[in-house]
């Protein structure tokens, strides 16, 4: 049994929190630069140039890409032959988030009570953590600082099985059309299909962690991703809502088996600063 110290998890998480907020992943950065070559609107081109410049400024000056340094969301794959020593996984991740956000002078955005007092926790904890037990002795940690503005533009709908592919397309396209410029486009659209009411929302979130350019492994869903992306960009919302062809950089779909009476669907939107980082210990 391989042993991993909780302090190792905390240190790695603290580093991830700071890196992910400063350095935009190459996949997203490349998608922005590619969009600049294809965008038809002069205003849209200018917006994309500014977004690209912003990414470079953040990297060169070691400052966050966006003032909203997000809710700390983690997907962890824990190898069943690895044993954590010195604490629990949740304690280790929360300690890492606290250290990373404090030492990195990142904005703390989490409030204790969602309805009444809304007092800031002061260290950006707690994190949202999803854990899967997998074969092996490795631990894979994927992290995303999820901004609140784009998170607010998300939705779940319990479709009927008879709604079929057309129903999913209508739901996603009409939803992002209603969101318009609010989620800071060009956006990345995470789509979940199947599972239950809560499972489908998690799938849509997980879809945002996939690198841009990596399609769903199943051809039918990869084709559906392309079809929805084309319809979304045909809306003409464009970068930051000023018009153009680049409303979305990508549509990612994740699926799960469904009940015979159900076909849940969910949309989770990310802004152009689609930050995500993954490590393996």
Image (spheres, grey):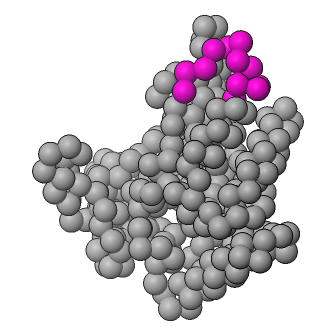
How many discs appear? 0
Instruction: State whether residue 126 is above or below residue 240.
Output: above
Report the magenta residues as a range: 157-168
Residue 18 located within the stretch drawn in magenta: no
* Residue at 73 percent of width and 51 percent of height: 235
| Along the viewing direction, whichever of 200 and 248 lies nearer the viewer | 248
| Along the viewing direction, whichever of 150 and 141 lies nearer the viewer | 150
* Residue at 51 percent of width and 43 percent of height: 154
- Judged from this view, the residue extending furthest toward the left is 117
**Displayed quadrant of residue 248:** bottom right
Q: Is residue 83 left or right of residue 228?
A: left
| Along the viewing direction, whichever of 239 and 266 lies nearer the viewer | 239
- Judged from this view, the residue extending furthest toward the bottom is 61
Q: Position of residue 160 (x, y in %)?
A: 63, 14
| Along the viewing direction, whichever of 141 and 7 lies nearer the viewer | 141
* Residue at 18 percent of width and 53 percent of height: 118
Q: Position of residue 267 (x, y in %)?
A: 58, 40
- One can see residue 222 in this view: no
Q: Is residue 4 left or right of residue 115?
A: right
């Amino acid at each position: 049994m391989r042993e991993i110290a909780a302090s190792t998890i905390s240190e790695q998480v603290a580093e991830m929190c700071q890196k992910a907020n400063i350095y935009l992943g190459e996949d997203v950065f490349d998608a922005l630069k590619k969009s600049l070559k294809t965008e038809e609107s002069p205003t849209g081109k200018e917006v994309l140039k500014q977004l690209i410049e912003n990414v470079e400024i953040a990297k060169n000056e070691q400052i966050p890409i966006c003032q909203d340094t997000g809710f700390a969301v983690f997907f962890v794959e824990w190898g069943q032959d690895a044993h954590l020593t010195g604490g629990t996984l949740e304690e280790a991740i929360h300690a890492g988030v606290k250290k990373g956000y404090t030492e990195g002078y990142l904005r703390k955005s989490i409030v204790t009570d969602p309805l009444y007092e809304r007092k800031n926790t002061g260290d950006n904890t707690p994190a949202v953590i999803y854990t899967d037990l997998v074969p092996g002795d490795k631990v894979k940690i994927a992290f995303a600082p999820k901004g609140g503005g784009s998170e607010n533009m998300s939705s779940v709908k319990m479709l009927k099985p008879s709604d079929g592919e057309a129903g999913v397309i209508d739901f996603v396209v009409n939803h992002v059309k209603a969101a318009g410029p609010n989620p800071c486009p060009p956006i990345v659209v995470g789509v979940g299909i199947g599972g239950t009411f809560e499972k489908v929302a998690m799938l849509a979130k997980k879809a945002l962690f996939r690198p841009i350019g990596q399609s769903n492994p199943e051809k039918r869903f990869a084709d559906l991703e392309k079809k929805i992306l084309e319809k979304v960009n045909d809306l003409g919302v464009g970068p930051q809502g000023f018009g153009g062809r680049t409303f979305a950089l990508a549509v990612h779909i994740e699926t799960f088996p469904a009940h015979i009476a159900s076909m849940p669907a969910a949309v989770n939107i990310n802004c152009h600063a689609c930050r995500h980082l993954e490590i393996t210990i």
